[in-house]
Image (cartoon, coloured by chain):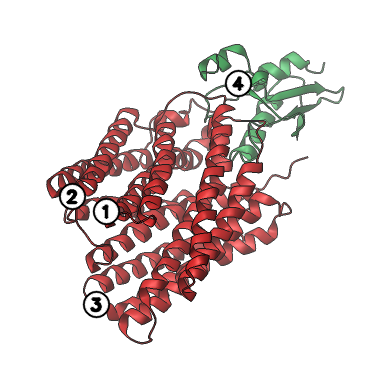
Chain colours: A red, B green
Amino acid sequence: MFNISQDFAPPFKLIAPYFRIGTFFYLAASVLVMFFGADIFHLDVYVLSWVHLFLLGFVMMTMLGAMAQLIPVVLEVGHFSVGVFYFIWPLLLLGMLMLVAGFYMAPALLPYGGAVVLVSIIIFVTDALLTLRKTEKLGSIAIRGILLPNVFLLAGLIVGIVMALGFTGAITIDIHSWLLGHVYLLLGGYVIITVMGLSLILLPMFGLSHGFSERPINLAMWLISFGVIAVAMGAILGISSLKILGFLLSFSAVTVYFYQLWIIYKTRARKEHDVWASSMYVAFVSMLVSMVFGAVYLLGGEHKYLLSAFWVLFYGLFGFVIIGHLYKIVPFLVWFERFSPLVGKQKVPMLADMVPTRAAGFQFWLSLTGAVICLAGFLGSSDLVFKSGAAFLIMGALVLVHNVRFMMNFKEGL
Amino acid sequence: MSATKDDIYAAIATVIDPEVGFNLVAMGLIYDASCNEEKGAKVTMTLSTKACPLHQMIVTWVKEAVTKIDGVDSCEVELVWEPPWNISMADEDVIKALGGM
């Protein structure tokens, strides 16, 4: 008999701020893109400020909200202390704002902002690890999908705080070398491994895929874990051969991961193309395209290929994988809170009824068009093209804010 | 008189998975059902995924639907993972609607 926890779904009011704030900062980041030039330098303070706004305000904020729901789903036990999620978002928001301001105009704020973010993440990781201890299924997915990314997340933030101290002049380090370690630990170690781990749960769940082998993703997660460690150590210790080994391991991991995605795709029973499915196609193609641009840059390509790699990673992979899942997670949480008590008593909507299908389609195409045109702006070094793409991104982000608001306020039939 | 297997299946067919929009019987999620002379029903079922966030609610809905039948006083639901569910267990119209045919 399967053990059924009564604490699986956290209250909607607890998670709602993460999605509201996350989508707001997606909009804010898209507006600020308008002030980029096609020839931006990745270490410009404006770019560093924007990157932290996008990654902490949109990516991390939304991912932490999603993890509040997904950790119990993956581990099949309730949170150790779900109430900590009331404290995580205000701390993350405060720390993010201090970092954004710090990079742009007040470097002295950076260590403090980093420390506040670290505190919020320590609270999150502590809950995740204590929840992990409650489960009897300390099996592969639980360990790799929850434990590994959180260890890399903490390591990446600690590296970031050391860099912040170096940025303010408090200590002397080679910030440029440490930057690669910081970026790789957080983007590769946390975001990519989390995407890999959750995709093994969420893609089959929404696509109704069954009977596929999980061996490729097991291999991919080990490869990328060793790749992240090798690149981070190589960057911090200044050992080039270790960095190259790490890059090769990472590229191998992504290749194997794509084989896993293909297997899941081929065994899916649900073949409708809703906005979630379309977003996943864009996200995973973006992962591949970003890897190609990254490889071209590492093989001696121009700076614009580095910008393009990160652009596609941010707005292609992170943007679409997160927004696509908002169209699944937000309706579920709202439905669970408002409509599940009414099942059997009155007609209740299906989850798909709560998604504004046409507006979601508009958002998808506007965001995709914007991201592609901006990429063309980078590659063609054209400000005009880049800014016209940014205009599409802003429109897409505005529609996203409307859509999330629509789903959160859905009360039809009540 | 205790309820028949068909009675129980008919009752469970009123329970709809809100994610896919089909009832649990049409999805092929119900493996067996019976009712003893003490009016205790037993349903053996699975879910389309182990990670289903609605599983505790679905089990509750099944119990509620079954105990509404005349001749059933209680219902025990056994959730099993063997044999694992796959789409071929669903009705043809479900498979067709999902795009699998």
Q: Which residue is mark 1?
A: A304
Element type at mark 2? loop
Sequence-wise, the earlier of marks 1 and 3 is 3
Q: Label 3 amino acid?
A: Ala
Badge 1 and badge 2 in a common chain: yes
Residue under pointer 4: B14
Asked if both marks, 3 and 2, belong to the same chain, the answer given is yes
Label 1 or label 4, whichever lies nearer to me, is 1
B46 lies left or right of A44: right
Query: Answer yes or no: do the residues labelled 3 and 4 have beta carbons within 8 Å?
Result: no
Name the N-terminal-most of marks 3 and 2. 3
Report the residue marked by disc 3: A106
Amino acid tagged 2: Ser
Residue at image x 23%, y 45%?
A374
Mark 3 or 2, closer to the camera: 2
The chain identifier of the residue carrying mark 4 reads B
User: Which residue is at a point 77% across and 20% down the rendered structure image?
Assistant: B71
